[in-house]
Amino acid sequence: MDKRIKILIAPLLGLFIGLISGCASTSPDNDQSTAWVTTWATATENIREGFWMSKGHFPPKPLANDTLRMFMRTSLAGETVRIKLSNRFGKQPVTIKKAHISKAVTPDASAADGEIDLSTDTPLKFADSFSVTIPAGGTIYSDPVHFNLPALSVVALSLQYGQIAEKPITGHRGARTTSFFAKGDAVSNKNMQGAIRKDIWYTATAIEVIAPSSKTIVALGDSITDGYGTKYNHHTRWTDYLATRLAHNPKTKHIGIANVGIGGSSSKMGVERYKWDVENIQGAGYLIIFVGINDIVYGNNRSAPFVIDNYKKMAKNAREQGLKVYGATITPMGSNVTKGEKEAVRQQVNNWIRTTSVEQGIYDGVFDFDAIVRNPNKPTYLLPAYAVDDLHLNISGYKALAEAIDLSLFAQ
């Protein structure tokens, strides 16, 4: 049986490149020759005291005056680059003494000693200064810099902090790559041998390239999109596999992807964080909504209409932004189906996604992820070959999701 997802296509929407709002730096021009497009991004989280999801995710050592090196896998190629840094949830200013971008020596460099290719080590400036202070609640861009960035590159961002309060701190818990915490100024160290290690990102929220004919897919989801169950330091989220397929297809190599999944996110949270995590993605052209399982499993008897209404709100926002919108069905919940009417809610939601969402023009098409990864002999469960637990996929499952997506939807 061919499991390729069947896509229902609605009338084509016009696309545009939105400007980032609320930035401390100058926004990009509308001119196509300076069209900034996101090649990597992550959703920002408020890592704070008193929130159970923040437990264990604070910096493992003080950051002030010391260096943090983080690794990210980009999607789109480019030759002019800038980064976005955020102090969105901080209560005090954050000072960056130095910021460097460089290429990793190997795709899994963060699995070893965080080694970089020193010939690519490039200092970044902010309004022509090597240091910058990000105000509480603020976001800032680096100045554009020439940096040869092939598609699917793994890069290192090395930040030497000055003043910084570590609680609360803006970051992302689900980095799935190892970051390195070194003493003093280590931004240009070849490797980070002896540094403290932790799988987390702080402060960095996006990498952008000038790519006038390109667009970015924004994947809004929960821990399944954020990559729970992946192989750490090997870039095996479903969005990573999709990025590889897009880059290797001549008709879609102009399409990047921004993963804004957050572990524990619900459809309600998706609505609440839409403006920051989707509208602020530079060069966005498409939105994939793959969220809702947490509403059903953990949402205190949330109904199908509740989840569907949130989908409609996100889709409305996306259409106002000029994006094409695709929805993905909710994957199996395993043993959680025994809890009340949860499976009935999932089926109602999925039926709406498969039929009504496109008929009513809410979505431009549907990715039937449920059909791809469910066990045909026990359809309320994931296929054992794809599962790490009742809810989450392994790398084979994530690859199956990516391979089932019809790339012609993103071709020009």
Image (spheres, rainbow, N blue to C red):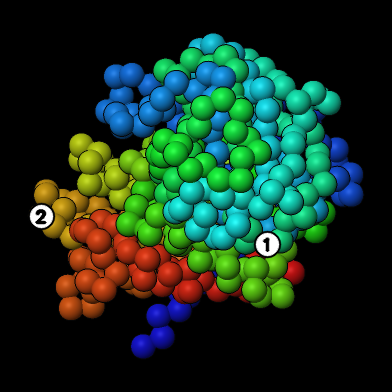
Q: What residue do we see at 29% from left, 29% from top?
A: 55
Residue at the disc numbered 1: 151
Local packing at callout 1 (Cα closer than 10 Å; few below 14, some 14-19, many 20+) is many
Question: What SS does tag 2 mark?
Answer: helix
Q: What residue do we see at 77% from left, 30% from top?
A: 125
221 relative position to 229: left or right:
right
Residue 69 shows in this picture: yes
Q: What residue do we see at 74% from left, 42% from top?
A: 122
- Contact between marks 1 and 2 (CB within 8 A): the answer is no
Q: Quadrant of the N terminus?
A: bottom left
Residue type beneath disc 2: Thr
Q: Is residue 146 above or below residue 411?
A: above
- Where is residue 375? Give x, y as percent: 23, 74
CA gap, disc 1 and disc 2: 45 Å
Where residue 14 sits, quadrant-wise, is: bottom right
Q: Quadrant of the C terminus?
A: bottom right
Residue at the disc numbered 2: 338
Q: What residue do we see at 11% from left, 49% from top?
A: 339
Q: Which is closer to the viewer, label 1 or label 2?
A: 1
| Front residue of 317 and 150 | 150
Where residue 21 sits, quadrant-wise, is: top right
- Where is residue 166? Give x, y as percent: 45, 19
